[in-house]
Image (spheres, rainbow, N blue to C red):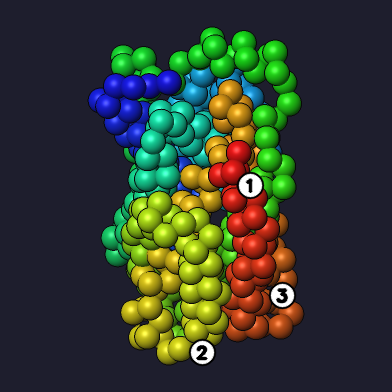
Amino acid sequence: MLNDKSRRRKVLLSGGLFHIFHDSIADGLAVLLPFWRTAFELSLTQVGLIVTCFESATALFQIPAGLLGERYGERRLLTFGTFITALCVMLLAFTGNIYHLGLLLIIGGLGAGVQHPLASAMVSKAYEDGNRRIALGTYNFTGDMGKFLFPAIAALVFSVAGWRQLCFGYGLMGVIMTAVLYLTLRRVQIGGADSQTVNAGRKSGGWGIENKRGFISLALIGFIDAAVRTSLITFLPFVLISKGMPIESGGLALSLLFIGGALGKFACGIMAEKIGIIRSIVITEAVTGLGIIYIYAAGLTWIFVFLPVLGMALNGTSSVLYGTVADFVSAFHVPRAFSLFYTAIIVAAALSPPVFGWVSDVAGIGFTVICVGLAALLTLPVTFILSAEIKTERVR
């Protein structure tokens, strides 16, 4: 447990920097999808499968990352995984076909699998005595800074160069950042193995989930929320292109969405502390579902105006969910609990794009947008189950 305020800030800063880079890749790659569709002559189903390559690999490594993090500490795994992801982004610049593209995304996705469970665990443990949701909300806010960063840089690069130059330059920047960050973490001795946690984990075993019903309901909301978020991010450029937007403006549209998302993750972490978890989830999911349906009906100009508002709701729910995970698990198993939770989320992110891509190929992109919006509203009934379990935890 960390009591020193300065040390806590360093944990939050370190986790935030990892989050900025990884989320910039995970969601920022959506900017490249229209270009890849043209370059490799892909259907929307195949576009969805490209996203699945990255997301499924990330999902596969969530649990191993959590278990290894308990044993060896977060620092080595975070820096090694980030280096692998950055290197694969660099190599995307030289890919010649869809098979090379898919392979690099799979390897890069495996490297990205370390970030969420280990960085979240570091921040959660550092602030376990108080302000955990605000700290995790801040951590999530940094991730959305990354989501905004990649599309914004892409919009600038595309005015003078192509997507290959963008990938090489951004990947190189990630490699340099990883080296600097590793040396910084090593110098301040953050993220090393905790012998107390290792020994406790060996003795107790299991996942450390003390309230299974609460954890499952939380993970189910996260599953649906992630499926909706990833599907919208994947197909939003194609929706806007169908309404007359130039292909080069995709980065601007996603930047507006992610700007709102960054504000939403920070604000919703605070909102959950002030008005409660359940009310926060209901508000963000209702606005998300209805807002996505509004995109189907609105004109291009009004959509661009509305995107920051939609982004706030779209990404705000996750801050509330992440800050609640530790409430249902034992203190010694926070990393593996986060890894299990993130596995559910990233599996949803991996499965939903090809499914909704197939729907788009069969029924059209407009029908798909409506389906995604209605899916977001499915989280509302599950919040009643979660509400009952949160009340049970308070009684204990």
Q: CA distance from mark 3 to mark 1?
A: 41 Å
> Which residue lies under the disc numbered 1?
392
Is 16 placed above or below 345 here?
above
Q: Position of residue 263 (x, y in %)?
A: 34, 59
Is 382 placed above or below 13 here?
below
> Which residue lies under the disc numbered 2?
297
Is 116 placed above or below 346 here?
above
Q: Position of residue 338 (x, y in %)?
A: 58, 37
- The local secondary structure at tag 1 comes to helix
Identified at 54% across, 12% down, the residue is 196
Q: Amino acid at mark 3?
A: Val
Identified at 56% across, 16% down, the residue is 197
Residue 359, numbered label: 3
Q: Amino acid at mark 1?
A: Thr
- The local secondary structure at tag 3 comes to helix
Q: CA distance from mark 2 to mark 1?
A: 42 Å
Identified at 37% across, 40% down, the residue is 131
Q: Earlier in the sequence, mark 3 or mark 1?
A: 3
